[in-house]
Image (spheres, grey):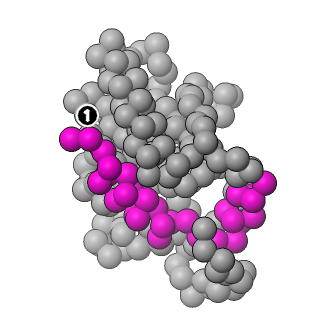
Amino acid sequence: MSGEAYGPHEFDDVPTDESSEFAAVPDAFQRLWTPHRLVYIQHGQQPDEHACPFCHAPELSDEQSLIVARGTHAYVILNLYPYNSGHLLVCPYRHIATYDQATPEEVAEIGELTQIAMRVVKEVSHCDGFNIGMNQGRIAGAGIAEHLHQHIVPRWALDSNFFPIIAGTKALPRLLGEVRQEIADAWPR
Ligand SMILES: [Zn+2]
């Protein structure tokens, strides 16, 4: 954690945009800027606003999509709206909404990838614990209810005390690329 402090107008000249089309689950925190938008601007492509972000992500490179690892039936991606640094999502490639629609193969690989993700994140981030789970349906808090995704949120002692302050004042997206690389490098191949 660096001690850098960013003022509220520090990034006024940085393009901002709605990030709802990205492969991530929005939360209540406000972000000042979204440099990931630059990926799309730089590459001259705009994601289809009607496309499912979790179906779209595997079509991109790992770096563009923030995918950490790809399995046969499911993949692991960094959440663009992390509750904590290293917040991962495990998604089946198939566009299914709820866990009971997953095949035995998908269930098995989602479980396997979740276990590996826990080991890798623990190794690289030395977290103290995890919150793991799936929100099923919008009423249950699913940001993208149409496509199943399992949250893996690393937790540190006291993180809930300072994180909202950090999330509200310091942009995470540039760091996400570094976090993705770190986790991908540590992922057993
Ligand atoms: Zn989908």
152 left or right of 105? Answer: right
Specify start and end residues of the magenta stretch as a single range: 161-189
Residue 2 placed where, x, y %? Answer: 60, 74
Q: Residue at x 33, y 12 (%)?
A: 104
18 vs 72, nearest the viewer = 72
Q: Residues within 10 Å of mark 1 (few under 14, many from 20)?
A: some
Quick check: is 149 in the magenta stretch?
no
Q: Position of residue 67 (x, y in %)?
A: 34, 49
**148 or 174, which lies in front?**
174
Q: Which one is in front, 140 or 156? A: 156
In the rendered structure, the answer to whether residue 58 lies left or right of residue 78 reads left
Quarter of the image with the N terminus in it? bottom right
Asked if residue 164 is positioned above or below residue 53 in the image, the reply reads below
> Which residue reaches farthest right?
161
SS at circle 1: loop
Q: Is mark 1 within 8 Å of ligand 1?
A: no
Q: Position of residue 134 (x, y in %)?
A: 55, 28
Q: Which residue is mark 1?
A: 71
Q: Is residue 139 visible?
A: yes
Q: Is 147 drawn above or below residue 157 in the view shown? A: above
Q: Main secondary structure of the magenta part?
A: helix
Which image quadrant: the C terminus?
top left
The answer to whether any part of residue 143 appears in the image is no
Q: Residue at x 29, y 16 (%)?
A: 105
Q: Residue at x 66, y 34 (%)?
A: 141
Would you place residue 144 above or below residue 23 in this image?
A: above
Q: Amino acid at mark 1?
A: Gly
Task: List x then y, in percent, for residue 178.
Answer: 40, 65
* In the displayed structure image, the side of residue 56 where residue 142 appears, left or right: right
